[in-house]
Amino acid sequence: MKYLVMLLALLNFSCSSTKKTPLTSAEDDILIYYSKSPCNGKCPVYDLWIFKDGSIAYSGINNVSVKGKINKKLSKEEFESLKATLTKDPKENITFKRKRDKSITTLNINNKEYKYYTTSASNYIKVLDSKLKDIVSKIMQNTASTI
């Protein structure tokens, strides 16, 4: 009898409705997700989230001058320039073929995920990739100078 009551209690809690958590709310506000994966060498590994309000979240993981989580806000000029670049839709499928010992870049924009190697990306993706790398560089320079 005791086991039956515990089983019913577990079933009751597992079937409760799901609510929108703050994390999923934050996911709805993400404008760009940009990530660099590891390689067998010294490739920088980090994640960058840019939100619709211009705030950014950086997470330095490995082979970067600044490790850990950093939250900042883009300047109005940087944010407007980035949004202007995003108005163009690449309307392309990047053919991705995994290569050994190459860092993979993941870019998530407009609910589309692109995985690519920087050397094989289209012009639009290269321009966007360059802007995002500049943002990461500024984060590292500004943070390293204040440490």
Image (spheres, grey):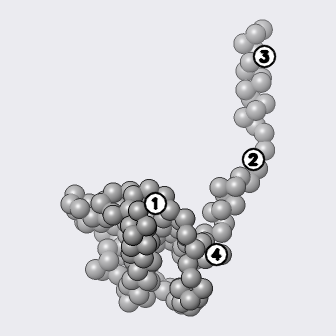
In three-dimensional space, the C-alpha distance between marks 3 and 4, rounded to whole angstroms, equals 47 Å
Label 3: which secondary element: helix
Q: Position of residue 107 (x, y in %)?
A: 46, 72
Question: Residue sitting at 23 percent across and 62 percent down?
Answer: 42
The mark nearer the N terminus, 1 or 3, is 3
Question: Of discs 1 and 3, which sits in the foreground?
Answer: 1
The amino acid type found where label 2 is placed reads Thr
In three-dimensional space, the C-alpha distance between marks 2 and 3, rounded to whole angstroms, equals 23 Å
User: Seen in the image, is 131 located left or right of residue 9?
Assistant: left
The mark nearer the N terminus, 1 or 4, is 4
The amino acid type found where label 1 is placed reads Ser
The amino acid type found where label 3 is placed reads Val
User: Seen in the image, is 120 located left or right of residue 136?
Assistant: left
Label 2: which secondary element: loop
The mark nearer the N terminus, 4 or 2, is 2
Q: Quadrant of the N terminus?
A: top right
Q: What residue would you read off at disc 2?
A: 18
Label 4: which secondary element: loop
Question: Residue sitting at 27 percent across and 64 percent down?
Answer: 43
Q: What residue would you read off at disc 3?
A: 5
Q: Examine the image and state in which quarter residue 135 appears.
A: bottom left
Numbered tag placed on residue 59 in the rendering: 1
Q: Position of residue 113 (x, y in %)?
A: 49, 70
Q: What residue would you read off at disc 4?
A: 52
Q: Position of residue 33 (x, y in %)?
A: 51, 69
The mark nearer the N terminus, 2 or 1, is 2
Label 1: which secondary element: strand
